[in-house]
Image (cartoon, coloured by chain):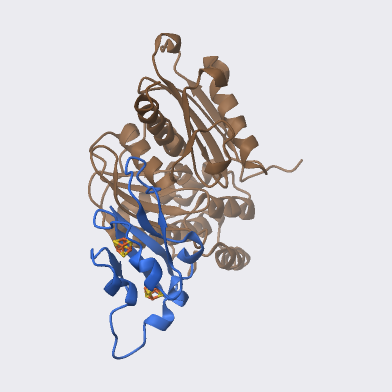
Chain colours: A brown, B blue
Amino acid sequence: MAEEFWRWTESRWTDPAIDWKAGKIVTGGVDVGSVSSQAVIMVDGQLLAYGNTRTGSDSPNSAMNAMNMAMEDAKVTYDDLQYTVGTGYGRVNVPFGQRAITEIACHARGANFMYGPSVRTVLDMGGQDCKAIHCDAQGKVTNFLMNDKCAAGTGRGMEVFADLLNVSINDMGELSLQVAEEPPPVSSTCVVFAKSEASGLLRAGWPKEKVLAAYSSAMAHRVVSLLERIGVEKEFAITGGIAKNIGVVSRIEKELGIKALKPTIDTQIAGALGAALFAQALAKKSGK
Amino acid sequence: MLANYGYQDGSGDYFITIDTDKCTGCGDCVTTCPAQVFEILTEDPHDPFREEPVAVVKSSEKKKIKYSCGPCKPVGERPPSPCVVSCRAGAISHNW
Ligand code: SF4
Ligand code: SF4
């Protein structure tokens, strides 16, 4: 089989130090996006485990796959989950979920946990859309804006470029920085147009890193203009898969003149993490 | 919360903002808007702890408000949009 350059690394993680059986409230959060799905298990406000996988053709299965990954090492079963919240594009199709909450709310809540209460601006660069969010010290949304009209500035766009250039998606950020001088950005971030423009540049003899630099800076510019509609207040944090792409992140930071906080855990799980946190609050409220 | 619904594209920015702290969920905007852009939800989808109704822009409308709102936005002498006038709480604004 040919190498699949777009394929990013699926992951799972469990905190071996937590004895969840001694905990009171065990909840789940599942984020079924158009490209990737994540599940998080929390116990008494602490992150116990997560799974991060590619979304398959059906949402209920993708939700289960991600949750099974999270459960495996922690040895948690579905019966142990007292409350589960679904989020993301497939949020209403989480078979074991009690409630669906939007990604906007969950990403703000998740970023608050991940990066701390000083976060005021969250940029989520997901698989298929891009969101700019302001939140307060509790992670509650105060202002938001979303662009889901096109795949510009999204993981899906990066995947298309990984395939076009035959570069692994994990290496694209670094590679895009290996240019002596920043080339002019591609004129369109619309994935379809950008792809044909990039093909033209390759034929004209541009090296891959230069094409990638031109695309990454167009992408950064696009999300910065989205962010500027609501303004950027410090601290600033990025969630979603593209937060792992140093080429895009550093170009966003440069254009804004603000550094993004450094992530400590997988930025793709922010939505599921927020969902599991809401589940903690909802479980308490429902008196379980 | 300022909920911005709409998009940016090559031709410009098109966003309707609903200030959910002001919105009472009265539904006047829903009955006034000729293009059925708004709907009332019993809970705010972006704020799980708010338990009062709130107006949102329908998801089917989010990607085309430039066109849906076109007839309300004549060039030249421009009366305020019907939705903005209808909202006694002053919760609705448009950026274009
Ligand atoms: S008219 Fe104003 S207050 Fe009433 S539902 Fe619409 S936005 Fe809310
Ligand atoms: S401008 Fe007109 S069409 Fe647009 S939301 Fe307001 S009332 Fe509806």
Dividing the picture into quarters, in which one does residue A262 lie? top left
Image vertical order of residue A249 relative to residue A287, above or below: below
Q: Quadrant of residue A183?
A: bottom left
Q: Give x and y (percent) for residue B68.
A: 46, 75
Between A116 and A169, the one nearer to me in the picture:
A116
Point 38% across, 33% down: residue: A278
Report the front residue among A229 and A162: A229
The single residue placed furthest to the bottom in the displayed view is: B76
Q: Position of residue A230 (x, y in %)?
A: 28, 58
**Closest to the observer, A118 or A24:** A24
**Residue A262 located left or right of residue A203:** left
- Quadrant of the displayed image that contains ligand 1: bottom left
Q: Nearer the viewer, residue A45 or A13?
A: A45
Q: Residue at x 43, y 76 (%)?
A: B34
Image vertical order of residue A145 relative to residue A56, above or below: below
Residue found at the far right of this picture:
A1
Q: Is residue B64 left or right of residue A108?
A: right
